[in-house]
Amino acid sequence: MQEDRRLAVLRAIVEDYVATDEPVGSKALVERHGLGVSSATVRNDMAVLEDEGYITQPHTSAGRVPTDKGYRLFVDRLTTVKPMSTAERRAISTFLDGAVDLDDVVQRSVRLLSQLTRQVAVVQYPTLSRSTVRHVELVSLGAHRLLVVLILSTGRVEQRVVELEGELADEELAELRSLVLRTVTGATIAEALVALRALGEAGEPDGRGPSAATVQVVEVLVDSMSDHRNDARVAVGGAANLARYGDSFDSAVRPLLEALEEHVVLLKLLGESGTGGLVTVRIGAEGPYEELSSTSVVSTGYGPREESLATLGIVGPTRMDYPGTMAAVRAVARYVSRILDEA
């Protein structure tokens, strides 16, 4: 009973401190949270929580504020992540469903996430090397021109025009399309590259050498799949939200503003992406950079068919609304995953 009550006191302290940015006293807790015990009992519980390192007393204030250890216990003891409201879910769906391509999905996601959480949002572009080939289409543009369309599981689409050395009859085009699809559909990028290079060297399964058109199409596809420009790209939004934390500029805001300039740092901050809706919360010194020890990161993976291709999340000072932020990060990731799955 005492442990449950102290956890309730800690939860109340975290909620009040996040909402007010003011140290929390026992009298305010009793008045606002209906804990069912006296101020003296709450003071005793606060003393125990302070001795155990979950809260601390800043300066000479009579109130207490949570420590990183206190935030961690608060997050770990959340029984459920609070669901988004119907209005919030509808807003997410409406905003993201209007995206026209992968870049638009990423840019909309980062804006939406920063607006929902009032934090700095970071969305990693889907990593090419972890995607699979969803479809390849060959479209005739004339006797000597061919459009090659590559569609990946990330939702990424590459289109290249091939100037053919000779004419390609409709029957030959159909055979080439079928051959390429059999070779790469469903394969990872690494597998597809190996299979395509073999096709370009060995030719058709019946022993004939590769046609000039086959060689040209293979070269274009290999070039498209070898383009790794997205592998370390992230989109960032909501940096203006850091203005809310002006009182902790030197300790929390300045280092974070500097980190926003380095995509590699942001990717390491986000960490490895989880799957199945798992949301990861790293608080303060749990992160990889000592200079960002006043920063927390809430992140999760996203991708089609439960396949985590990249990570999205938020970064901000440790004084944040963890339940609401976790719910928003999870909801946006689910909607983005659904969009990629249906692309």
Image (spheres, rainbow, N blue to C red):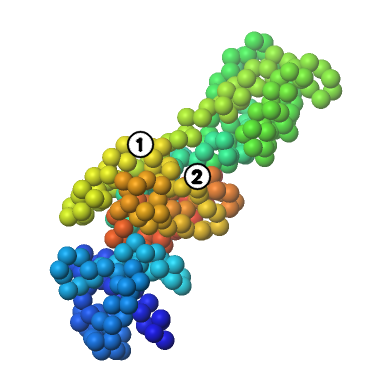
Marks 1 and 2, how far apart at CA? 17 Å
Residue at (34% x, 47% y) in the render:
290
Pick whichever of labels 1 and 2 is earlier in the sequence: 1
Q: Quadrant of the C terminus?
A: top right
Residue at (49% x, 55% y) in the render:
334
Please report contact status of discs 1 and 2: CB closer than 8 Å, yes or no.
Answer: no
Residue indicated by mark 1: 262
Number of residues whose C-alpha sits closer than 10 Å to that of mark 2, classed few (under 14), some (14–19) or many (20 or more): many
Which x, y percent locates residue 192? Answer: 66, 31
Q: Which residue lies furthest to the top in this view?
A: 165
Which x, y percent locates residue 327? Answer: 41, 62
Q: Nearer the viewer, mark 1 or mark 2?
A: 1
Which x, y percent locates residue 206? Answer: 84, 23
Per the image, label 1 sits on a secondary structure element best described as loop
For residue 85, say whether it is visible. Answer: no
Left or right of 117 in this view: 4? right
Q: Residue furthest left?
A: 60
Left or right of 117 in this view: 170? right
Number of residues whose C-alpha sits closer than 10 Å to that of mark 1, classed few (under 14), some (14–19) or many (20 or more): few
Up-down: is 317 above or below 221? below
Q: Which of 38 and 279 is in front in this view?
A: 38
Residue at (74% x, 28% y) in the render:
179
Residue indicated by mark 2: 310
Up-down: is 272 above or below 208? below
Q: In which quarter of the image is residue 53?
A: bottom left
| Marker count (numbered) | 2
Residue 245: mark: none
Which x, y percent locates residue 170? Answer: 70, 22
- Amino acid type, mark 2: Ala
